[in-house]
Amino acid sequence: MQKTCLECGEKIVGRADKKFCSDYCRNAYNNNINKDSTNLIRNVNNSLRKNYRILLDLNPTDKTKTSKSKLLAKGFNFEYFTSIYTTKTGNVYYFVYDQGYLPLEGDLYALVKRN
């Protein structure tokens, strides 16, 4: 029985359980299957990555303060974070991986690094 590539339809030579004629066709086939959901995931990951870089840039000493306007000027998006930590005293820290921020009074934010 002749098998054909699932992506391009070419004749497959080799192992009996092979589904694609080349790595290119295998990758193209899987990319086409996953592309609908990956746009959303890619955009969220890009936003998280950008927020992480901004926090890392503004917090070189693992603990500092900055203003909301400075975060926004660099393009920080407060809608994207990976976790929330609430202390026993009720303070709510927002984290992007290991970099976090705590809203303080006024326009200030405390930036921290989780160890």
Image (cartoon, helix red, strand yellow):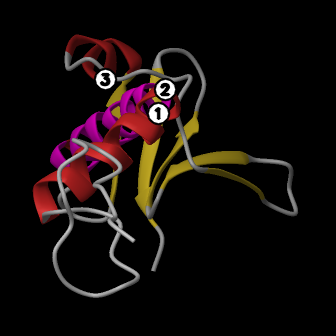
Q: Earlier in the sequence, mark 2 or mark 3?
A: 2
Name the spot of residue 15 as percent of width and height, x first. Answer: 28, 87
> Is residue 33 shown above or below 36?
below
Please indicate, yes or no, whether residue 63 appears anywhere in the rendered image: yes
Please indicate, yes or no, whether residue 59 appears anywhere in the rendered image: no
What residue is shown with label 2? 36
What residue is shown with label 1? 109
Name the spot of residue 21 as percent of width and height, x first. Answer: 17, 63
Q: The residue under label 2 is which amino acid type?
A: Asp
Q: The residue under label 3 is which amino acid type?
A: Leu
Name the mark nearer the viewer: 1 or 2: 2
**Under tag 3, what secondary structure?**
helix
Query: For mark 2, does the 10 Å Cα neighbourhood hold few (<14), some (14 to 19), or many (20 or more) residues?
Result: few
Name the mark nearer the viewer: 2 or 3: 2
Quarter of the image that includes the N terminus: bottom left
Query: For mark 1, does the 10 Å Cα neighbourhood hold few (<14), some (14 to 19), or many (20 or more) residues?
Result: some
Q: Is residue 55 magenta?
A: yes
The segment highlighted magenta reads 38-57
What residue is shown with label 3? 71
Marks 2 and 3: CB-CB under 8 Å?
no
Q: Which residue is drawn at 25% across and 44% down?
A: 9
Q: Does the magenta stretch include residue 67?
A: no
Q: Quadrant of residue 88?
A: bottom right
